[in-house]
Amino acid sequence: MNRTRTNDRFPRTRNGSADSGKGGSRFGSSAPRRSGGPSRSGGYGRRPAAIQGEFALPKTITPALPAVEAFADLDMPAELLAALGSQGVSEPFPIQAATLPNSLVGRDVLGRGRTGSGKTLAFGLALLARTAGQRAEARQPLGLILVPTRELAQQVTDALTPYARSLKLRLATVVGGMSIGRQASALRGGAEIVVATPGRLKDLIDRGDCRLNQVSITVLDEADQMADMGFMPQVTALLDQVRPEGQRMLFSATLDRNVDLLVRRYLTDPVVHSVDPSAGAVTTMEHHVLHVHGADKHTATTEIAARDGRVIMFLDTKHAVDRLTEHLLNSGVRAAALHGGKSQPQRTRTLAQFKTGHVNVLVATNVAARGIHVDNLDLVVNVDPPTDHKDYLHRGGRTARAGESGSVVTLVTPNQRRDMTRLMAAAGIVPQTTQVRAGEEALQRITGAQAPSGIPVVIKAPVVERPKKRSATSRGRRSPASAARRASGRQNTVGAVA
């Protein structure tokens, strides 16, 4: 492929003219200049009928560029291509192959793909490639990625860091539950890309530590969850502050009518790509509904947790998570709890222990339903069935990631069967239904369940080495020059106060 570049930074448009200058012209002729976004009355042409309760996707007006077969076919910096090779990323996933040719020339993108399908690199590579060679001023990032949860923010940052480093771009992660002072310091020092949750970013803007007027590329990841969590007013307020002619990319595993507002208001003639069917069900994932009696459910859950290998178990409430975790630890199962009541350092440490295998069972609320990637995780268990089909799909999406296989098991008591049938129908899934009891062969065959050891275990926090404190003797010995400096400092301080 002939890669003609201008100033080693901006690609040429399809008709061969160079992208140059500032504002909307830098995004290429294939990205129309924005003037407040399309009107609510239209702007996308006729829209197809909605499926599975989702809104009807807009029809692309300007034809999309065709998908590529290899990253080398894309007009990206050589350093970025080399970083992909060093990370062992050889071929693009379908959503990357379809959207990157268009996002790299500045087109707005509306991408739908199940969790684990490669969305992070689909938007991340375009954002990094188009920001390469630029330098952000203090408090004025050039690119913004908005995500709904702290865990997803950290995962996006971890995924993009090696590629950003190859281009000498600085990333800043802005989330609640962590030191706002340190985050403000990172922004004051200059960061080209900010990965943020809406609430904390708003706080930093209100403090004067961040301005979005130079943000020319904005990404919304898992926008439907941000709407479900009540972030929509904050999201729209933030989008109103970025450059109006800039590029917008919206990616999610599911797109419902709550996201329709964002699409109509902020995306201009987007390239629309959907990797998977609307429901998001995957062929590499097995779905099991296990009918259990209420009195037997607790024992069955314990036996599943005692299996060989890792498993995520979802429950509805923080209290239920803590109780089950304590029971599993007392039963000899290496388990840890993850929910919104934990501090961010605790949540980060728990996830690290689960990913490294120090903990075998992660017991969690829906806080773990998105933004967690664990290699070789082949089982997810809904101890408490979800109430919404989207929650089911996102919980299940923790397994069978990146083309791997996995199973999602839901424990259903007799009074939950009717609701579960409706949920599965809404999700477009036909599960395998089995009546099971604790200790029986069917439970072992489907989940790998086995009897726990019964020997209580204690999960200790990793030992962190701290710098050694100076002894009293060493603190008392000061050189004459040091003593003089300290005396001078005291004099200066007194003078300043006076």
Image (cartoon, grey):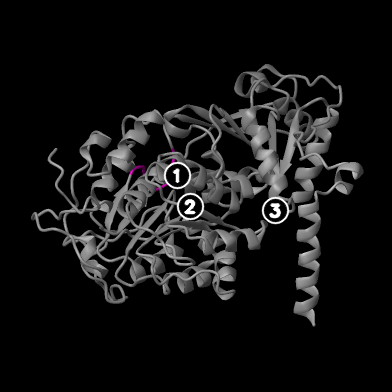
* Depicted 361 relative to depicted 214: above or below: above
Amino acid on which the number 3 mark rests in the picture: Gly
> Which mark is on residue 160?
1
**Do the residues bearing badges 3 and 1 touch, measured as CB atoms within 8 Å?**
no
Q: Which residue is mark 2?
A: 171
Q: Which element type, helix, strand or loop, lies under badge 2?
A: strand
> Hey, which residue is sitting farthest bottom in the picture?
498
- How far apart are the two marked residues, 3 and 1, measured between alpha carbons? 25 Å
> Hey, which residue is sitting farthest front in the picture?
480
Amino acid on which the number 1 mark rests in the picture: Leu
Q: Which element type, helix, strand or loop, lies under badge 3?
A: loop
- How far apart are the two marked residues, 3 and 2, measured between alpha carbons? 25 Å
Residue 383 visible in the shown view: no
Image x and y of residue 134, in percent: 34, 57
Amino acid on which the number 2 mark rests in the picture: Leu
**Do the residues bearing badges 1 and 2 touch, measured as CB atoms within 8 Å?**
yes
Residue at position x 75%, y 36% in the image: 465
Q: Which residue is mark 3?
A: 340
Q: Comparing marks 3 and 2, which lies closer to the viewer? A: 2
Q: Could you tell whether 325 is left or right of 378 in the image?
A: right
Residue at position x 83%, y 27% in the image: 457
In magenta stretch: residue 395: no
Find the magenta span and give its range: 275-281
Which residue occupies the foreground of this view, 81 or 372? Answer: 81
Determine the main secondary structure of the stretch shown in magenta: loop
